[in-house]
């Protein structure tokens, strides 16, 4: 029990003991007042033998004592009830607090056990992760050791290893450059291949390969100074020409260009001055003119409009144009669409000839495109003039530019291989059963080239 509650309980016990002593002292006083124990006669019924005046003070004293005793007894009962109620309430509060305290202690114990379990799980997880990290670190160390060994082996093989591997690599690169020049005429790729071979020879720094390195340098210088054809620019011009062929107007209207030809449209525009300058009739106010002037102007305007309308209507039926091929004016819309499709196919054929380095096909296709633009298309249209200009420039461009070769480098490699074969074929002097002949490196070279 806490110290404060113990003190309150002790104080209440002392109060109860003092109240009991007070009751006992009052009882003793009453016994002293009436030792015989017989009740005193009532004041309302005086005996005839005694005088009422003499017995009246004694009766009053006894009544006052009796009243005081009753009051004290009531006070004592009230105090006892209050003390009992307080003790019961205190006991009940103490039990409730004890239950709450026990519940809190149980909850705290449960939380502590859960925290202990979680801490143990965290410790076990940390230990497992630490083991995994150690395993990964060990694996990383092994991988690094293997990488260092491989790097050292590769360094030994490339820098101070066999010359056969270096020669095979250089021959493979020179062969790639030769193929790029022979098949596609791609000088840029050939230069890249030769520069790679030159860098490998320079990194190896072998004196017996100095002549091969000088030969490759000579071929590389000739390729750098060679005049080449700008293939991307020519391909772009061909794409532009294909778009113009698909949209430029022909001598007869079709689905791609349904408008009037250029001469008819120009004639219609020139024959309609009222439509070309509509603001000429509204320069001055009609109120400021003389009546006959207004009549003359009205007649002139009416006649001009009538002549323009008649000329425009007649121009739709009759048109005078100059055509090199009369059949171009008799094409139907289907034939016009077929003509445009055939010309686009010729443009694609010219692109293939450019990529494959076929000057004969290139020349024939560009000349056919130029002739079609001259005979089938409207020469006064802006798109036709632009397309003809591009076609003429393409026809004048020669794609059969003679490119240098890398035959010197290939010959130097073959000479070097022959020398190595001779050295390997010489028998060893002083051996009992002869020296073993080294295998020819040609199969390995062919495998690398594949």
Image (cartoon, grey):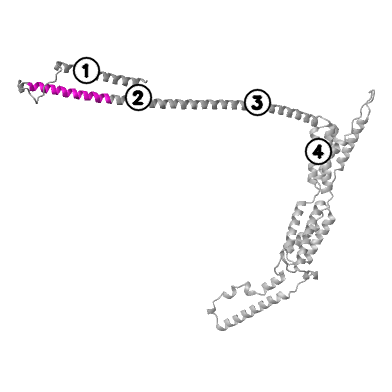
Query: Which quadrant would residue 394 be assigned to in this image?
Result: bottom right
Q: Is residue 52 in view?
A: yes
Q: Which mark is residue 134?
A: 3
Choose between 438 and 96: the one closer to the eye. Answer: 96
Mark 1, other Cα within 10 Å: few <14 / some 14–19 / many ≥20: few
Q: At numbered mark 1, what does the secondary structure look like: helix, strand or loop?
A: helix
User: In this picture, is 232 found above or below 31?
Assistant: below
Magenta: main secondary structure: helix
Whether label 3 touches label 4, CB < 8 Å: no
Judging from the image, what secondary structure is the residue with disc 2 in?
A: helix
Find the magenta span and give its range. 55-81
Q: Residues within 10 Å of mark 3 (few under 14, many from 20)?
A: few
Q: Is residue 71 a member of the stretch shown in magenta?
A: yes
Q: Measured from the top left, where is residue 297 in percent x and y?
A: 60, 80
Q: Which residue is mark 1?
A: 24
Going from N to C along the chain, the mark reached first, 2 or 4, is: 2
Which residue position holds label 4?
A: 197
Q: Residue 391: x, y in percent?
A: 77, 60
Separation of residues labelled 2 and 1 (CA atoms): 29 Å
Q: Residue, x 87% and y 41% (percent of image)? A: 408
Image quadrant assignment for residue 216 = top right
Q: Give the CA distance from mark 2 to mark 4.
A: 104 Å
Q: Is residue 217 visible?
A: no
């Amino acid at each position: 029990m806490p110290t404060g509650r113990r003190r309150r309980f002790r104080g209440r016990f002392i109060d109860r003991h003092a109240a009991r002593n007070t009751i006992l002292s009052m009882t003793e006083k009453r016994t002293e007042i009436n030792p015989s124990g017989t009740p005193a006669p009532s004041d309302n019924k005086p005996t005839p033998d005694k005088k009422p005046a003499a017995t009246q003070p004694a009766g009053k004293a006894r009544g006052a004592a009796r009243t005081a005793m009753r009051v004290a007894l009531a006070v004592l009962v009230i105090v006892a009830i209050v003390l009992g109620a307080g003790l019961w309430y205190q006991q009940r509060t103490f039990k409730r607090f004890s239950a709450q305290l026990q519940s809190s202690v149980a909850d705290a114990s449960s939380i502590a056990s859960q925290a202990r379990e979680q801490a143990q799980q965290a410790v076990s997880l940390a230990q497992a992760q630490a083991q995994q990290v150690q395993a990964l670190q060990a694996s990383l160390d092994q991988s690094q050791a293997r990488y260092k060994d491989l790097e050292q082996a590769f360094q030994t093989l490339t820098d101070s290893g066999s010359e056969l591997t270096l020669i095979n690599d250089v021959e493979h690169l020179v062969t790639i450059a030769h193929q790029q020049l022979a098949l596609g005429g791609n000088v840029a790729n050939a230069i890249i291949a030769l520069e790679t071979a030159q860098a490998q020879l320079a990194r190896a720094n072998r004196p017996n390969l100095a002549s091969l390195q000088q030969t490759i340098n000579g071929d590389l210088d000739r390729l750098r100074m060679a005049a080449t054809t700008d293939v991307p620019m020519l391909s772009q011009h061909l794409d532009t020409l294909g778009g113009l062929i698909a949209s430029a107007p022909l001598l007869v209207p079709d689905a791609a260009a349904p408008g009037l030809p250029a001469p008819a449209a120009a004639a219609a525009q020139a024959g309609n001055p009222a439509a070309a300058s509509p603001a000429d009739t509204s320069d001055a106010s009609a109120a400021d003119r003389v009546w006959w002037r207004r009549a003359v102007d009205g007649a002139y305007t009416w006649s001009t409009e009538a002549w323009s309308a008649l000329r425009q209507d007649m121009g739709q039926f009759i048109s005078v144009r100059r055509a090199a091929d009369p059949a171009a004016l008799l094409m139907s819309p289907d034939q016009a669409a077929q003509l445009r499709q055939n010309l686009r196919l010729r443009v694609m054929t010219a692109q293939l000839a450019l990529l494959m380095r076929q000057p004969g096909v290139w020349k024939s296709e560009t000349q056919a495109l130029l002739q079609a633009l001259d005979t089938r298309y409207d020469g006064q249209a802006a798109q036709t003039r632009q397309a003809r200009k591009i076609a003429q420039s393409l026809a004048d461009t020669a794609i059969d530019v003679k490119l240098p070769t890398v035959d010197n480098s290939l010959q130097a490699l073959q000479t070097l291989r022959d020398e190595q074969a001779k050295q390997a074929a010489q028998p060893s002097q002083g051996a009992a059963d002869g020296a073993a002949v080294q295998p020819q490196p040609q199969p390995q070279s062919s495998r690398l080239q594949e």
